[in-house]
Amino acid sequence: MASQKIGECDYVLLCLDTRRTYMLKVETGKTFHTHKGYVKLDELIGKEFGVAFQSSLGIVFTALKPTLEDYIMKSSRKTQITYPKDIALIVMFSGIGSGSRVVESGTGTGALTTALAHYVKPEGRVYTYELREEFQKNAEKNLKRTNLLDYVELKSGDVTAGIEEREVDAVVLDLAVPWLVVPHAYEALKPSGTIVSFSPTIDQVVKTVEALQENNFVFIETIECMMRAMQVARGKTRPHTMMTGHTGYITHARKAVKTRQETPEKPA
């Protein structure tokens, strides 16, 4: 069982309330300053995750063990990330698990890559394609922080020109022209394998669905996920005014095996 005590170089999520949280690396001699006072991080070493403690101004913080969502939402960003509400459905629709082999494009910040790697470890592998070097380097940094880089192969390449891998369990796409990748995804997937595509606009979805239909994919479905948080207090519980509304559409489908058409015999 993993240690539940905070150690040197561990990451902690310092929680003041639900809106103010801070992801920090615990290092000897490091002090974290806030408007609620400062915190000496090395004083957390040896204490249990979940411990409550006071800042220099007597304000109570809680040191939590970061979850997968925390690592994703607190990642270093050079582009828009995929939100946890969409990641959860992408992972579910992909059907992946420990030992699965997954092709992803594009890598971006590595938020979705992080989730895919988390679910395929320790025997599986994520092959993630990205054209922009600065995005790839940033994603590598985020994956190192989560200790998931060992389960990911960062690749420079354009999947609209082809996918190198074969017999993979799933292909996950988050790029501008997913319909151009559909034929290559078909070649890369195992029979009955899954393709999942995330697109912000419905025009992209229409072209992708048409490409799926033309390339012998079945069980094609497109969904949109909205998430609304609740403000809970006795006598005044109501939805929050602000919500995470439209982020994108998720289209998923399965690879069907093409049947050979027998050539009719020529008459004698």
Image (tube, grey):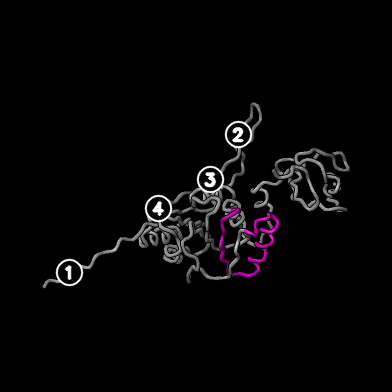
Residue 245 at x, y percent in the picture:
55, 47
Q: Residue at x 63, y 70 (%)?
A: 133
Amino acid type shown at disc 4: Ile
**Can you tell which mark lies on residue 220?**
4
Instruction: Give me the C-alpha separation between circle 1 and circle 3.
Output: 56 Å
Quadrant the C terminus occupies: bottom left
Q: Is residue 46 left or right of residue 152?
A: right
Instruction: Give me the C-alpha separation between circle 3 and circle 4.
Output: 20 Å
- The residue to which callout 2 is attached is 238
Comes first in the chain, label 4 or label 1: 4
Is residue 25 in view? yes
Mark nearer the viewer, 4 or 1: 1
Comes first in the chain, label 1 or label 3: 3
Badge 4: few (under 14), some or many (20 or more) residues near its Cα, within 10 Å? some
**Can you tell which mark lies on residue 265?**
1
Comes first in the chain, label 1 or label 2: 2
Residue 201 at x, y percent in the picture:
49, 57
Q: Secondary structure at mark 2?
A: strand
Q: Secondary structure at mark 4?
A: strand
Q: Are marks 4 and 1 in contact (CB under 8 Å)?
A: no
Amino acid type shown at disc 3: Met
- The residue to which callout 3 is attached is 226
Above or below, comparing residue 42 to residue 189 in the picture: above
**Of all residues shown, which one is farthest toward the top?**
235
Mark nearer the viewer, 1 or 2: 1
Q: Residue at x 22, y 68 (%)?
A: 263
Magenta residues (range): 121-150
Front-most of residues 175 and 201: 175
Determine if the magenta segment contains residue 39.
no
Q: Residue at x 78, y 38 (%)?
A: 51
